[in-house]
Image (cartoon, coloured by chain):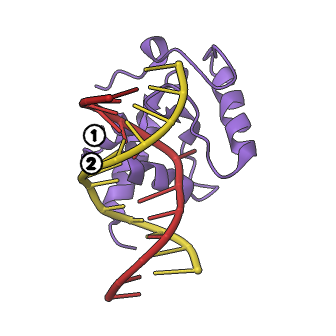
Chain colours: A purple, B red, C yellow
Amino acid sequence: MKSPDTYDAIYSVVLSIPAGTVATYGQVARIAGLPGRARQVGYAMRTLPADSGVPWHRVVNAAGRISPRRDPDGEWLQRKLLEAEGVEFSGYDRLSLGRYQWEEE
DNA sequence: TTTATGGCTGTCA
DNA sequence: ATGACAGCCATAA
């Protein structure tokens, strides 16, 4: 792999997101020390090992929505997982960022 | 190696 | 609110 530290930092941040809250890709990227690399965070999620134990569902895009990924079922799964943590959705995939967005330490 | 694509973001029309 | 553009750069072919 190219930079293990990068992924490690990303995972670490995502793992730090409290249940019932969400964070944006850009936010995670910045906290992980990767400003402007939100996309790479998304890639990190995409290539996530199924057994990584990373709560990727707590990461949403800047609009407070679930990003349309390649696997249509994941979108549904993510919403379900978030609802299970107490996050309310306004529409099919929308949620109140102002209320659930994670405030980093 | 080069190219294309992508779970994004912020700005502007 | 929606759509187009331009940066960011790792992964896949």
Q: Chain letter of disc 1?
A: A
- Quarter of the image for residue A19 reads top right
* Amino acid at dot 2: Leu
Crowd around label 2: few <14 · some 14–19 · many ≥20 (10 Å) = some
Q: Provide residue A105's location: percent of width, then percent of height.
A: 28, 25
Q: Is A36 rendered above or below residue A17?
A: below
How far is mark 1 from mark 2, CA to CA? 5 Å
Task: Give the mark count.
Answer: 2
- Relative to A81, say whether A8 is above or below: below
Which quadrant holds the N terminus of chain A?
bottom left
Residue wearing tag 2: A34
Chain letter of mark 2 equals A
Q: Which mark is residue A13?
A: none
Note whether residue A37 is visible. no
The residue depicted at 57 percent of the width and 18 percent of the height is A95
Instruction: Please provide percent x and percent y for residue A77.
Output: 72, 37
Residue A66, position as x, y percentages in the image: 58, 33
Q: Indicate the secondary structure of the residue bearing disc 2.
A: loop
Residue, disc 1 = A30
Residue C3 locus on image (x, y percent): 50, 36
Which quarter of the figure has residue A78?
Answer: top right
Left or right, B4 with respect to B2, comes to right
Would you say residue A81 is visible in this rendering? yes
Q: Amino acid at mark 1?
A: Arg
Q: Are marks 1 and 2 in contact (CB under 8 Å)?
A: yes
